[in-house]
Amino acid sequence: MVERIDELYRESLTLYTSPILKSGGLKYLSDKYIPENPLYRKEHILKLSKWVYEFIDNSIPGTIFLEGPSGTGKTMCFKIVEKFANRRMQEESISESRIIYINGRNRTIMNVLTEILNTIGVHTPHRGLSYGEVISRLLETSRRVPIHVCIDEIDQLRVYQDSFNVEDLLYLFSRNEGLSLTTITNNYNFLGDLEDSRVRSSITKEKNLIFERYNKKQCFDILWERCENAFRKNVISEGVVSKLADYVSDVSGDIRDGIDTLRACVEICQGDGLQIIDEKVLERAVELYRNRRMIQKIHALSNSQRTVLAAYYFNIISNGRTEQTMEEIFDMYYTLREKMGKTSTIQDVRARVADLVTFSLLESIKSGRGPRKGVERRYRALIPMEVIYRALITDPELSDIAKGLIDEVRKKRLRNYI
Ligand SMILES: Nc1ncnc2c1ncn2[C@@H]1O[C@H](COP(=O)(O)OP(=O)(O)O)[C@@H](O)[C@H]1O
Ligand SMILES: [Mg+2]
């Protein structure tokens, strides 16, 4: 018995030990990991920390703006400065202050404010508080203990009760002692789009940091450091990482793309029992990652846009035609919408097909109807069928209908075959 359990124990260790990853190496391939050695962002970190220290030490209001495309280290820089500020408070016996990080995605202004209160330990009753009550409790606290809040992805914040929006929040943090703010966005129009003149006049752009995309060398250095921490010796070469850096800097300059692709490499090696990430594995990982991104992009479309794509797909599996006319797409779209209890018009479909062409998911081609019959416009997918299929069967709203239709087509084929 003891022997068997020992054997099982050893097997559990071998299974857990990866031939390619160092023990604990996976954490370096997470985009939540804050690097010990943040490259190329020293200036940003120093400026940001100086401004945050100034705000909290003097209890003055104000806003810092961090702008730049996705995966350029904005969140990372704030998280590092948050750590620095807390460390400084302990080491230098600076009087108490609070730094709070909140992501604005899918939250309302009210959610953000109550989250701040909860984090600083202000009791909020079960019945909830009114907007005014929340503000007065916040101001009461911030007069005693300066609070610096970071709202990441601030452009994603939602309006509360049709009246309190992001401008109210900016106004609040620009006028009240002890309250200051860092906002992060990848929308360059965010500041320009603010309409409220009260807010415009009270914010200055002098505390504004721009994050540029990383170039190839920078991508390489950042990714190489991750690889050295994550992988065992000789699992991945500089040449392969350089190829990855080439790809990342070419398509986006977003380090997250590189890190996610490295995780896809791990998945492929684990699935196939490989011990080296060579160029072939990398190519497969790039493809896998690209397809996953495409599926995410499809899921982010509106219901009717996704239904158009579904209609195109079902036409292919039922009649094999990859180039389809608007009418063909409309017929299938109509059937699908009927199953969902929704109506449809050809104008609707025209507009949605045009959207998909704009998003580079479909392309429009002219094809001949036959001799002397003129030409007609047809549509064809720019993404692999496999990707559309995966997107459909994992679609939160369409998957049941999709699976049902796929089954129907399969049965029909089987009947014809017999
Ligand atoms: N200069 C850098 N050095 C090391 N890692 C970086 C650097 N910039 C970004 N990263 C890493 O890339 C990932 C994405 O960065 P993040 O700060 O989340 O980007 P953003 O907020 O701009 O979208 C994180 O894992 C982060 O640690
Ligand atoms: Mg971020």
Image (spheres, grey):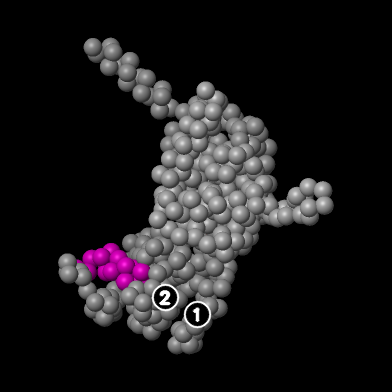
- 381 or 273, nearer to the observer: 381
Q: Amino acid at mark 1?
A: Leu
x and y percent of residue 390 in the render? 51, 41
Quadrant location, the N terminus: top left
Task: Tell me which amino acid carries mark 2.
Answer: Val
Q: Give the answer, above or below, for where 321 lies relative to 362.
A: above
Q: Is residue 110 magenta?
A: yes
251 to 59, vertically: above or below: above
| Residue 122, position as x, y percentages in the image | 22, 69
Cβ–Cβ under 8 Å for marks 1 and 2: yes
Dot 2: few (<14), some (14–19), or many (≥20) neighbours within 10 Å? some
Q: State the extent of the magenta-drawn residues as a range.
A: 108-123
Tell me the quarter of the picture where residue 233 sits: top right
Describe the element under mark 2 as helix, strand or loop: helix
Residue at the image position 50 percent from the left and 33 percent from the top: 412
Q: Earlier in the sequence, mark 1 or mark 2?
A: 2
Instruction: Tell me which residue sits at (46%, 43%) in the image.
Output: 402
What residue sits 45% from the left and 60% below the top? 343
Name the residue rendered at 62%, 38% in the picture.
Answer: 320
Q: Which residue is mark 1?
A: 194
Q: Mark 2 = which residue?
A: 166
Residue 359, above or below 142: above
x, y percent for residue 232: 53, 31
Whether residue 367 is in magenta: the answer is no
Q: Is residue 310 visible?
A: yes
